[in-house]
Image (spheres, helix red, strand yellow):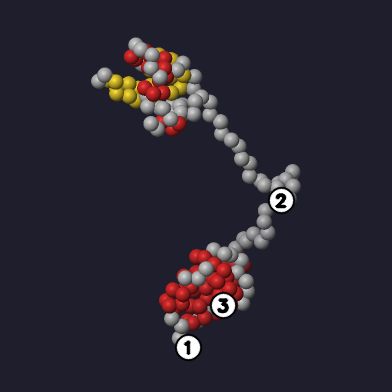
Amino acid sequence: MVLNIAKELAVLERMTPTELQAKYAEVFGEEARSRNKQWLLKRIAWRLQANEEGDLSERARHRAAELANDADLRLTAPRLPKGFPDGQDRTATLAVQFSGAARLPLVGTVLKRQYKGRVLQVTVLPDGFEYEGQLYKSLSAVTKAITGAHWNGYHFFGLSKPGGTQ
């Protein structure tokens, strides 16, 4: 019986992962270790094609075995470091904390604003803000130096919401 691999592949692609696992067991004679649909599709298609057109030659099998013997394969998982009980999650999760307001950009950011025909540039520093060589403790202080009136510094530079969005 001649098998049409393209038609068989179209049928396989419409199967669910559970159905593909059953097909894998039928074709390979053993249960699949994966539920990944793409992996199952590739493996089943390969096996169907190998069964139809012939498997690897003895020479190719012998060469593959030689290569595998020369390879340094890890057969067991790495040992746990001393002090780790078995089954403990080895991933450490730490919360990152930023000082200052949530809507304030990272240190080193240059805030730019067009005001009365001038382009204003303010650099965010770890301990304040730098504008024209002067150090200011707040954006509002920078804004007062620029305009002569009290403004909300965040609003003046367009930092009304976290992340600098309006």
Marks 3 and 2, the one that precedes in the sequence: 3
Marks 1 and 3, the one that precedes in the sequence: 1
- Classify mark 3: residues with Cα within 10 Å, few (<14), some (14-19) or many (20+): some
Q: Secondary structure at mark 3?
A: helix
Give the residue pinned by disc 3: 27
Q: What's the amino acid at mark 1?
A: Met
Which residue sits at x=52%, y=81%?
A: 51
Determine the image quadrant of residue 120. top left
Q: What's the amino acid at mark 3?
A: Val
**Residue 16 at x, y percent in the picture:** 52, 68
Farthest left residue in view: 117
Give the residue pinned by disc 1: 1
Side of 159 relative to 65 (left or right): left
Report how far apart the C-alphas of labels 1 and 3 lie in the structure: 16 Å
Side of 2 relative to 157 (left or right): right
Which residue sits at x=39%, y=23%?
A: 155
Give the residue pinned by disc 2: 87
Report how far apart the C-alphas of labels 3 and 2 lie in the structure: 35 Å
